[in-house]
Image (cartoon, rainbow, N blue to C red):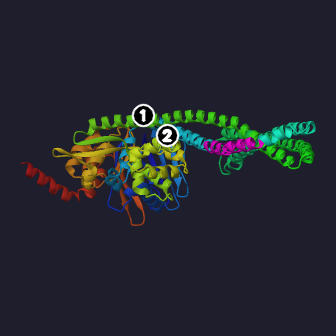
Amino acid sequence: MHIKRIQVEEGFLDGLDLTLPPGLVTFIGARGTGKTSVIELIRFCLGVGGHTAETTSVSREHALSILESGQVTLTLQDGTKEITISRSATDDSPRITDIFTAPIIFSQTEIENIGLQSPGRLRIVDGFLNGREITKREEDAAISETRSLTAEMSKLRKEIEDIEMQRGELPSIEAQLAALKPSEDQLATMSDGMKQKTDALAAVSAELTSKEIGAKAVSTFMEAIVSMKNNLVAAAGYQHRLDPWPLAATDLIAPQREQLLLIEKNIQSSIAGLDAVYESTSALAAQTQKSKLPLEENARVLRREIDQLKEGSGAIVRQAQLLRTKKAQLDALKPMIDSRRERLANITAQREKALEKLETARQIRSKMREEVINDLNGEVGPRIRLVLERSAQYDRFATAITDALKGSGLKYNELALTLAREMSPRELMECVEKSDIEFIVRAVATSKDRALRIVSSLKEVDLGLLSTTLVDDDVAFQLLDGKDYKDIGDLSTGQRCTVILPIVLQHKNRLLIVDQPEDHIDNAFIADTLITAINSRSKDGQIIFTTHNANIPVLGESECVVEMGSDGRRGFVKSCASLNEQVTVDAITGVMEGGAAAFKARAKFYHLSAS
């Protein structure tokens, strides 16, 4: 794929209209003529961000200042297919006629500094990964599933905990019933009349208890209906977003729009169905409550009659009835808690599978990175070496732990780093869920009291988010200096560039755009390494360089040299021709060699020194 045409309307480069070939394309010209501006407009039009948030912001501001209120349009040639991308200064994103593979674009400062940060180095390596999008989709799906299941597990645990707390009253209730039993037995032996009434009251009480348990079940069911309806309502109501754009010539997504509208209707139908179920259940609840009234009145009459036979007996019977009703209600919670425990076990198993999918996706990516690094080392070694270290970037995980521990009273900064270094996100989550204090004590060499406080604090946060935090790989970029390899962080700016450029140029077929690659590197490196890498690329691909160094277009045998000029108000193309045309020779001689006289003087000097 290559950029076939660049068109700019308005702004500093108003009227720019360039047709470019595959291969090496070089932009030359004096400073301030718009070479870098062309690169930034290409980046803006294609929606390719910088390699850091800062460079992304700077790049966008540069493009908008050049474009003003105008528009830039690119035509890409991808095999036999032409793709048009346009973007105006007011567009949030590019307008495209087809999907395309984004080029690799480096500004001058990005080449110098990208290797200093772990994410930057990893991004360079990931640019070579095939199937990266598939792995990312699998990873995102596993993350979403893990977080959803973890949230449901947390909810179930809370429900189980609440039910267990309620059932914790059972021993006390049973003890009170045991204490009342002698008094009840005494009442039963007093007379035949007393026994008949106590037996009748027991039967009424049992029926009332059954009604109470049924009413509670109906109430719980109604709460579930309300929850389901709220979820559906949250998913509905998007129809206003599905309207076609009023200025669009044709509705490109008409079939998809119809499908979404059908889904919307189904959601509304489901909401109406839930309303009907809620209404009928509400009527059942009212009927259940109404059916309790005569039973309660009958129980009151029987208690008064029992109390008349023996003063104080009614209170004993009433207390026993209340205790038995409460006990029956708590006993009825046993199947409920068993059901939730079974559901929790099933969801836990599902989450284990989701976590395994997540780990597999990330392991596959790491394996792919290893293969890329082995290939790169074969191309750029032994002078340049790349070394992968798996799961070495734990700063993001440490930050997540720090945020989770805020307000805990713990000194969490150093603690978060230790936890992130010694435990994986999954291990930490499982320790918190199981309250495994001993594991944390051993892992981070802390006291049981502190480990308990850690667990208690983390139980209050989103463990699904914490457990899926990425602890990414790291890759070292090294340069052979004498007999030893030096890490890129210990190199000069020029040495860093001599490491990064050969790696980037291993993209043999992908569109590559670099602003002034020669800065901070010497001509020997350009001739020996940079030009060799350029010439080894496929001629069907395209490299676009802006440069002040004549060796790049000349030794790189540039297919097209574009000379930019400026009148101070506007930048424009002075010439656009192949390397061997006279206009290009004159441009390179005048702009890059200091003029014909200077070039001839150097040529004479080289001839004399050679002889």
Q: Position of residue 334 (x, y in %)?
A: 69, 36
Q: Main secondary structure of the magenta part?
A: helix
Verify whether residue 164 appears in magenta: yes
- Upstream in sequence: badge 1 or badge 2: 2
Task: List the residue tagged with mark 2.
Answer: 82
Question: According to the image, label 1 marks what residue?
Answer: 364
Q: Secondary structure at mark 2?
A: strand
Q: Position of residue 14 (x, y in %)?
A: 47, 59
Q: Residue at x 65, y 48 (%)?
A: 248
Instruction: Using a 10 Å C-alpha cutoff, classify the residue at mark 1 as few (fewer than 14 neighbours), some (14 to 19) or many (20 or more).
Output: some
Q: Quadrant of residue 306?
A: top right
* Mark 1: amino acid: Ile
Q: Is residue 436 above or below residue 592?
A: above
The residue shown at (52%, 51%) is: 456
- Which is in the foreground here, disc 1 or disc 2? 1
The image shows residue 491 at horizontal and vertical percentages of 24, 53
Chain part drawn in magenta: 157-180
Near-viewer residue (37 or 604): 37
Return the residue nearer the eye: 591 or 219. 219
